Amino acid sequence: MSTGRLENIPEQCEYYIGNVYDEEILTQLEKYHFEAIIHIAGQSSGEVSFEDPVYDFNTNAMSTLLLLQFAKRKGIQKFIYASSMSVYGDHEEELVDELSLTVPKSFYAVGKLASENYMRIFSSYGIQTTALRFFNVYGIGQNMDNLKQGMFSIYLAQGIDNHHILVKGSKDRFRDFVYIDDVVDGVLFAMNRTDGAPFEVFNISTGKKKTVEELVTTIQEQLPWDVTVEYVEGTPGDQHGIYGDNQKAKELLQWEPEVDFEEGSAKMIRWALERRRK
Ligand SMILES: NC(=O)c1ccc[n+]([C@@H]2O[C@H](COP(=O)([O-])OP(=O)(O)OC[C@H]3O[C@@H](n4cnc5c(N)ncnc54)[C@H](O)[C@@H]3O)[C@@H](O)[C@H]2O)c1
């Protein structure tokens, strides 16, 4: 519950609240049979990973190792993981695919890449493991109070609450924004993948880039009041920009994004304004 909310847990779910790198919590789950583990818990800010690299390691890498050991012990067949585009770092060739070099720039990205490698090794024990490299996820339901994670939600929250957006870093940086519903589909398609490979990595991306300036302009244009913008120095380990080739996910998962940036951003902004009025 560090950044999560109880009301986001669907009613039909049984849940245990605990720390994902605390082995004790796993002992409470021993009594169940699971078809799959979808591991999405973790702290997701590159900035926080520099403030506390050990905490970051524990939530993003140690947690994966413990859950994989649990999966092996329990004979769980499938393991799906929320990895990140940050594992790539920055590249001269800005369009990256799953064979591009991984050069993490933050401790957060190191933890994500370590998790992928634990998964690769554990796949030899008969667990089908799938790492989904999410690009910049945004959309309805995003945490609007966490100002250290989520480029879209941070700028939008500032635009709504302060009528002023403080951008840490250059306006020329860019991201590949992928809508939450498409990301959820990516996870479900990965659950059902049939290619038979013990371990796979997929970009969950749109293959399109949007600059920080374009994002800020979209927010300015759609909010019903004037919003000023200020650019200051960037945060450590921030990527300038890459965008993701999604051909592999299209071919092997039959997944492809359905919500484009225009539709997704309009939905997100409408939702955030509505939420603020309540
Ligand atoms: N949002 C993105 O753009 C993006 C991109 C790439 C990867 N990811 C990954 O996707 C996953 C979900 O991210 P999100 O954007 O929904 O973030 P979020 O902060 O909204 O959700 C993370 C969830 O994990 C929980 N959590 C954090 N540390 C925990 C711990 N030690 N034990 C148990 N629970 C813990 C939080 O309370 C929250 O419910 C993360 O693993 C993140 O690294 C997200």
Image (cartoon, rainbow, N blue to C red):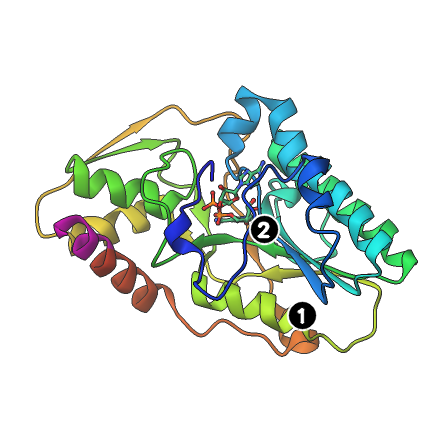
Q: Is residue 105 something one can see in this rendering?
A: no
Q: Residues within 10 Å of mark 1 (few under 14, many from 20)?
A: many
Span highlighted in magenta in the image? 272-278
- Residue at 8% x, 47% y is 225
Residue corresponding to mark 2: 40
Q: Is mark 2 within 8 Å of ligand 1?
A: yes
Mark 2 vs 1, N-terminal side? 2
- Residue at 87% x, 50% y is 121
- Residue at 65% x, 23% y is 54
- 93 or 76: nearer the viewer: 76
Where is residue 191 shown, x and y percent of the image?
Answer: 67, 70
- Please state if 254 lies on the left or on the right of 265 as rendered: right
Q: Residues within 10 Å of mark 2 (few under 14, many from 20)?
A: few
Residue 96 lies, with reference to residue 11, above or below; the image says above
- Residue at 51% x, 33% y is 238
Type of the residue with mark 2: Ile
- Please state if 17 lies on the left or on the right of 24 as rendered: left
Type of the residue with mark 1: Met
- Please state if 79 lies on the left or on the right of 82 as rendered: right
Q: Residue furthest left?
A: 225
Assign a secondary structure to mark 1. helix
Q: CA distance from mark 2 to mark 1?
A: 14 Å
Residue corresponding to mark 1: 191
Mark 2 and 1 residues: CB-CB less than 8 Å, in contact? no
In this rendering, the count of numbered labels is 2
